[in-house]
Amino acid sequence: MSVKSQIKEKWLLYRLEVKKDPEAFGELYDLYAPRIYRFIYFKISSGPDAEDITAEVFLKVWEHIRNGREVRKFAGLLYKVARNKVIDFYRDRKVKVEALDENMLEQLSDLGAVQKNLEARDELQNLIKSLRLLKDEYREAITLRFIDGLSIGEIAEILNKTQINTRVLLHRAQKTLKKILAAQEQK
């Protein structure tokens, strides 16, 4: 996240916490909703369910702030709540992860010109299939770092780990992902 974005986020949080400005929350929502939706969608592979959970995440964060609780890092809070909501989703519904469908690729158009280039589209499908073969902790760390672009510190906060443990986790996740991708190329 750029310095300008961090300053804007802090200003919006100030307006929200001190002045109780709901428009500030709307701006924060606009800033983070696509990222939180993508994070959730990668975990559950269902557009409608991801939309519902995204709405629940922002409602929970809104209530958290309205109740006067301090927010140090808005993104960290959002991802923690999103992560817990996904856990609740699987616990409550015992849903199995669905296969990747065409809608997901269309919704991920911000990852590049996926729809224009069939080769890139196939590579993305293979990457997503490979990510699904990773254990949850590895997949989550890679998604947060390389898809959502979060820093090691932000990921550590979300995963309740130290920064060193987070770096080790990311290293192991990348190493495992490389092995999976190499094995798929040999097939």
Image: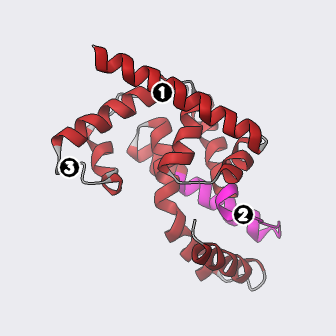
According to the picture, the residue beneath numbered tag 3 turns out to be 115
User: Which residue appears farthest toward the bottom when viewing the image?
Assistant: 19
| Residue neighbourhood size for the residue with mark 3, other residues' Cα within 10 Å, grouped as few (<14), some (14–19), many (≥20) | few
Name which residue lies at 62% across and 74% down: 3
Say left or right for 46 vs 7.
left
- Which mark, by number, is residue 2? none
According to the picture, the residue beneath numbered tag 1 turns out to be 177
The magenta segment? 54-76
Q: Main secondary structure of the magenta part?
A: helix
Depth check: 23 or 183 in front? 183
| Residue neighbourhood size for the residue with mark 1, other residues' Cα within 10 Å, grouped as few (<14), some (14–19), many (≥20) | many
Say left or right for 79 vs 109.
right
Depth check: 21 or 170 in front? 170
Kindly report the distance in space between the C-alpha atoms of the residues bearing marks 3 and 2. Answer: 34 Å
According to the picture, the residue beneath numbered tag 2 turns out to be 73
Disc 1 marks a residue whose amino acid type is Leu
**Position in image of residue 183 (x %, y %):** 37, 16
* Marks 3 and 2, the one that precedes in the sequence: 2
Disc 3 marks a residue whose amino acid type is Gln
Whether residue 88 appears in this view of the structure is yes
Helix, strand or loop at disc 3?
loop
- Please identify, in this view, whether the residue under mark 2 or under mark 1 is nearer the observer: 1
Kindly report the distance in space between the C-alpha atoms of the residues bearing marks 2 and 1. Answer: 30 Å
Residue 166: image quadrant is top right
Asked if the magenta segment contains residue 58, the reply would be yes
Asked if the magenta segment contains residue 67, the reply would be yes
